[in-house]
Amino acid sequence: MGTLILFIALIFEIAFAVYCMITKQNHKKLKNWIRIAVFIAFVILTLSSVIVWSFRWVMLAMLLFILAVKGTASLIRNKTNNQKYKTSSFVWNSIIMIFATVFALAPAIVFPQHKSPKVTGEYEVATTTYTYIDKNRIEEFTDKGDNRFVNVEFWYPENAEGTYPLLVFSHGAYGTKASNTSTYTELASHGYVVASIDHPYHSFYTASEDGSKAFINTDYNREISDMNKEGIYTKEELYEAIQKWMKLRTDDMNFVIDTILQKAESDSNSIYQHINTEKIGVFGHSMGGAASVWLGKERDDISAVVNIDAPFFSELVYKKDIDDFVASSDAYTTPLFNIYSDDVWGQLESNSTYAANKPNNEHFKEAYTVHFKGAKHLSLTDLPLFSPILANILQGGKADIDKYYSIETENELILKFFDYELKGIGHFTSEETY
């Protein structure tokens, strides 16, 4: 929608400029009426939901409103033909207007209006966000001596009765708790309470209940960037960095799960009272997927794990004599479902970071693996819907898979897996490739 509006605006501005230069007149009265009409059309399109109002349209609305007000004032004062036509001035005014339009439409182009992936469950879904303060940990990323905080957003069945399994999600290296909103919504609509975590200073951005904000830590950002570069880390140094990253992640997830379980026993809040504390699953994307697999090995109360495009960091062992990673020989008994894009699938046999991820790893007692052919790393999140431009930049190009097919199929498979493992519904099967 944003690109279409920009295209129409540019065509109009150029055509009107050419018309004025041919006739050697400003046609200011006509332009004023057009600006008023455009603003009215924008309001009508917004009220009729053709344009769905959101942050992406704020700057354009302000620009159109200002132009409409100026046009109205000019018409009322009847000062429409007092200005002598000058080609140079007219061209500069047109250029300025084009740049202003591009700037105002930038949010709508970078974050285009899009349809939401389908939601198939019977329940209406509600959301709420809380900030949990961990009194047993001091924040390592600041020198203020504050306790570590974790922001948690819940998606849950609204006005529903009974209790539902708890699912806890961890985002990727630069992500946010909203990274897979369509997945949480689909799960909640089928009777799950989903808690998605922001890992402060690992997430791109997070805001607490008290208004305090935290952005991604520059040192952590550099470490993650260096992880994939040759010659920066030795394998031993990379192994140590992985342990550090995973400790923060799993500590956050353990803290959130323990806090929710405690509140389910003592807090009268309806969200907590709707949680079946005997049925817990964890899932995550990228580094969050690795942390979820790790937690599935550590905790006895986790009954199912979904790993979205991540290495099994918990199952890697560093061997100093060969200076490389090998897969652990420990058994992994928690049911596990792996979803891989091309970016990871192509590395399973060649990159030792994925030594434990191979589908034929006999130490995984109940593991399922699927490959989304044509998908890139971020195809397994909502970002290609929310901002195709950012997704393509961050993942190094456009994916060859349809973005709606990718996320909706992923959501369907995750739902079926959790239904089978946590609710005993049906029997989980999947194709190897989608």
Image: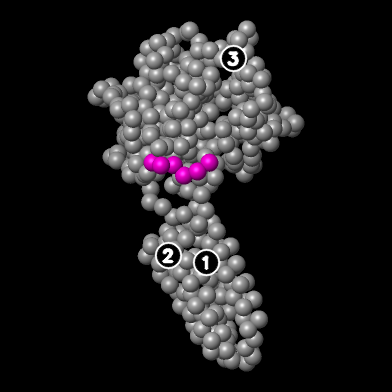
Classify residue 396 as left or right of residue 182. right
Name the residue tied to disc 3.
324
Q: Nearer the viewer, residue 389 or 421?
A: 389
Cβ atoms under marks 3 and 1 closer than 8 Å: no
Does the magenta portion include 235?
no
Q: Looking at the image, can residue 151 be seen?
A: no
The crowding category of the residue bearing disc 2, from other C-alpha atoms within 10 Å (few below 14, some 14 to 19, many at least 20), is some
Cβ atoms under marks 2 and 3 closer than 8 Å: no
User: What is the C-alpha distance between the residues marked 2 and 3?
Assistant: 58 Å
Name the residue tied to disc 1.
61
Please tell me whether mark 2 or mark 3 is closer to you in this view: 3
User: What is the C-alpha distance between the residues marked 3 and 1?
Assistant: 56 Å
Residue at 50% from the left image edge and 43% from the top image edge: 397
Dot 2 or dot 3, earlier in sequence: 2
Magenta residues? 396-401
Q: Quadrant of residue 224?
A: top right
Q: Residue furthest left?
A: 426
Three-letter residue code for mark 3: Asp
Dot 1 or dot 2, earlier in sequence: 2
145, above or below 298, in the image: below
Residue 352 place in picture, x, y as percent: 53, 19
Residue 176 place in picture, x, y as percent: 54, 38
Name the residue tied to disc 2.
46
The crowding category of the residue bearing disc 1, from other C-alpha atoms within 10 Å (few below 14, some 14 to 19, many at least 20), is some
User: What is the C-alpha distance between the residues marked 1 and 2?
Assistant: 10 Å
Way the structure is coloured: one colour
Residue 168 place in picture, x, y as percent: 46, 28
Cβ atoms under marks 1 and 2 closer than 8 Å: yes
